[in-house]
Image: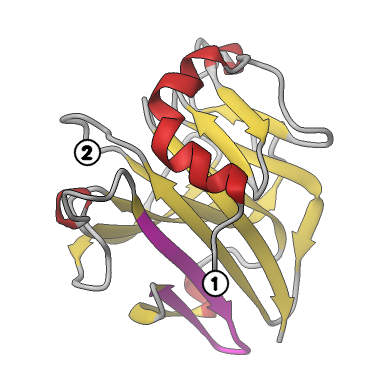
Amino acid sequence: MRKPLALLWFLSAAPLAAQDLPKGQFPAGWKVRTDRANESATEIVFVDMAPGWHLTTGPAAILYNPATTASGNYRLESESFLFDPGTRNEAFGVFFGGRDLEGAGQAYTYFLIRRSGDYLVKRRTGAETPVVVDWTPHPAILKYDAKGEAASTAKNVLAVEIGPEAVRFLVNGQQVTTLQRTDVDTEGVVGLRVNHGLNLHVTTLKLQKR
């Protein structure tokens, strides 16, 4: 399948173009919350750019549309392209089961990967972020340095499949771990999570009832 022209252009021109994109002006309906109260979302670029969105972070943040919620059994999937992170090994991915996302009692589970080919599963409950699965390498994750000299980005597809009892975590179609449903948050808002100083193009954030 041929990539849309807008994406082909951005895959080659993103580092330069991102400098000209507006900060703090987000897609309609979307909200952005930084990890720390003293960090401002106005330092984040997050704009519509077909297909999907382009974003460049300063502080780490979650990005979400409060109307995009999931319950019961479902599949959440997101395709992203990571542009040159330099020496940073910061993480990015998806979150699900979000509740009270603008309040002190915010809660969600997040599934992240990073340039070195590792994945992580954590929960947030207020100010606490307990680890569910600590950083673990997996060959399914495309490392940025392994993308090939001809490529300007590293593409990875993350998916979470919520079943009646188990939750499967997949990268590029391969299961990297499975957990009991009781180990994670499943009911609520879904969205993106991106840590400090990353430049990404996210083409999809798809929900499918199962």
- The front one of 195 and 82 is 82
Cα–Cα span, label 1 and label 2: 31 Å
Instruction: Please indicate whether residue 3 sits to the left or right of residue 59 in the image.
Output: right
User: Which residue is depicted at the point 55% across and 59% down?
Assistant: 3
User: Which residue is depicted at the point 58% across and 18% down?
Assistant: 21
Q: Position of residue 42 (x, y in %)?
A: 61, 12
Magenta part of the chain: 155-170
Report the mark closest to the observer, 1 or 2. Answer: 1
Q: Which mark is residue 89?
A: 2
User: Which residue is depicted at the point 41% across and 80% down?
Assistant: 173
Mainly helix, strand or loop, the magenta region?
strand
User: Which residue is depicted at the point 56% across and 89% down?
Assistant: 165
Q: Position of residue 177 (x, y in %)?
A: 33, 78
175 is higher (above) or lower (below) than 106 = below
Residue 103 visible in the snapshot: no
Tell me, yes or no, whether the highlighted magenta stretch contains residue 133: no
Q: Position of residue 95 (x, y in %)?
A: 55, 54
Give the secondary structure at mark 1.
Answer: loop
